Amino acid sequence: MRRLALLLVLLACCCAHAALPPDRFDTSDLTRLADVTEPTFTTDGQYIAYTVTTANTATDQPQSDLWRVRYDGSERTQLTSTPDSSEWRPQWSADGRSLAFLSDRKSQASDDASKADADASSDDAATQVWMMAAHGGEARQLTHFPDGVDDFALSPDGKRLAVIAYDPELPPGATKPKNPLPLVTERYLFKDDIDGFLGPRHKHLYVFDIASGHAILLTPGTHDEQLPAWSPDGKLIAFVTRRGDDPDRAMNYEIHVIAPTAGAIDRAITSPAMTSLNPDWESRAAWSPDSTRIAYLRSDYAHWLDYSPWQLAIVDVATGKESDLAPIDRCFYKPRWAPDGRSVYALVEQSLVTHLARIDIVDGKLTELDHGDRFDFDLDVSADGRIVVLGGDDRHPYEISAVEHDALRPLSDHNAFLRDKRLAEIEAIHYSSKDGTPIDGLIVKPVGWQPGQRYPTIVRVHGGPVYQYSREFMADWQAYAAHGYAVLAVNPRGSSGRGFDFAKAIYADWGDKDVQDVLAGIDYAVATGIADPERIGVGGWSYGGILTNLLIASDTRFKAAVSGAGAANFIGMYGADEYVREYELELGLPWKNRDAYDRVSYPFLHADRIATPTLYECAAKDSNVPCEGAEQMYEALKSLRIPAQLVVYPDQHHEMTVPSYLRDRLERNIAWYDRYLKQPPTALK
């Protein structure tokens, strides 16, 4: 009995971490963080509306509310507070007196005959467009689409909406069945991480008249439309779509425009040879002030997928003539026109940072408007030329700032509690990989770091793979550092921020050069004296989970690993996830290119090379990287009697949202690393 009691104590120690001093950032602080997004100006530039998402601990769900602040920084006001629903995507009316937005509130009853087609179960919450006064107060529901609204844009005169909505699942007046209908599909792409299984229904563009409540379908057909944007003169709506005999097989999105009238025919204004405004890039068509041109992003996605940088381009709406505005070998984001039409503002990614820049229309000259170790995520420009940028740095999550004279003036402050926290120091590192390739990254020093002392080190590998770690606030890094870990965050080949050649170096060859780059980063961290070579852990999510599997199958130095939403048997993933087109382009067909699939699947096919205790995590509804990937690797390690654990988060997609699950995941990660990096291994629960 005494031996059993001792064993239970050891198990408790390895599955829970000790309480930290209150000035450390801990897992409990995850629910205190506020996510600030979607800044948008009133026409006169006096006010900015934005969205703040926090954790509702009572419902254990994220909750988004709308806020407003004056440009001078005064009158920061919360406009909505609805514990049982969220509000987001704010858009001002032209006179600044009203604010339209999306909300998943329960529908308001309506006697309007035009809304009688709403589903019989209208008490259910479905996302619709609502509107309220600029100062807040009671909102009224504008739309009543049976299956909700996916996206919308308010017309310049404030009288109409461009709405993206799914075809109704049921005929008008039909009673909703007690159980979901069977899925019947003949589509090449039959699943999506957010929308789930895809059948014959599609997302189409409607124009909705606010006064009458009538909606007109503008784009019927077996294709989908996204990202609506009105021209300033109100005569056209731009949107993105894939067309052709089988739109699911088309790799490239095109920008189309259409008049907002019944019977109008849309037309493409960008070339199908390039992809324009892939919705994953989260950037909309930006109309010039005179409604004649559109600034947008494009890339050679059909040949190089996201390895190809997203370039800033302009298209003449009347002629379709396209041109690159600033042909540099970097990614652009979120273009906006200056009011005089002489320049475009955009975010430009460089190694480790992303900054706001102004690009001259005539000569393409690029001028950065903010500087330093920061990451900018969004922006807006008012009709009178005022600019706000949403961004942050190592110690500050995203907040909104006014851009004035190349300086930033804070406008929002929703994470003030972090000023009372003792946060970790983060430094940029630069070193050479095995073949001499220069590599960049970041190293996070444990809180209380002392020179000359080595620390257990967690190597974090990012998703994508075309993404990069930047100078932005990373909550998990701060929690690891607070618990005594150094964190090594490397941007290996395949990452963005360093140009096309650097990114495409791993095309169809995952786990070769990027593994070399990460291992060289570990050698660097050991050589600098901060990393303990006997206590190295590794982990990541998405491609970070994939690369974790590749690393532990390539090197036995890792004493613990956490592979989240990863995979290793890519023949097994073909058809199980949402990337069938990308697999066929990059790796070929499994029955014709078996060698390519075997090459990138070596962690599964050679699992006997793995000696690292590994925690596998996945989200049950993830169609991006489904649980099959984690399950297969978990089973392989269990078969080999290597310590392993599998955690499945119910009802979650690839980007997990439930606050308690996010905290649970981080706590499990820390406990797993503690078990193998801070004390001798013990038996698993």
Image (cartoon, grey):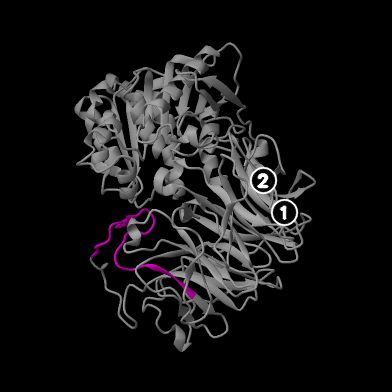
**Depth check: 247 or 347 in front?**
247
Q: Residues within 10 Å of mark 1 (few under 14, many from 20)?
A: some
- Give the quadrant of residue 545: top left
Task: Say which residue appears at 48% left-offset and 28% top-offset.
Answer: 18
Report if the CB atoms under discs 1 and 2 are less than 8 Å apart: yes
| Marked residue nearer the N-terminal end (1 or 2) | 2
Q: Which residue is identified by label 2?
A: 356
Can residue 587 be seen in the rendering of this structure?
A: yes
Range covered by the magenta-colored residues: 183-206
- Element carrying mark 2: strand
Name the spot of residue 295 as percent of width and height, x first.
60, 57
Give the amino acid type for the residue marked by disc 1 in the picture. Ile
- Give the quadrant of residue 71: bottom right
- Element carrying mark 1: strand
Tell me the quadrant of the picture where the C terminus can be found: top left
Name the spot of residue 523 as percent of width and height, x first.
47, 16
**Depth check: 487 or 576 in front?**
576
* Residue 514 is inside the magenta segment: no
Asked whether, in this view, residue 93 is left or right of residue 272, the answer is right
Task: Say which residue appears at 28% left-offset and 29% top-offset.
Answer: 603
**Depth check: 160 or 47 in front?**
160
Name the spot of residue 630 as percent of width and height, x first.
30, 38
Give the amino acid type for the residue marked by disc 2 in the picture. Leu
Q: Which residue is identified by label 1?
A: 387
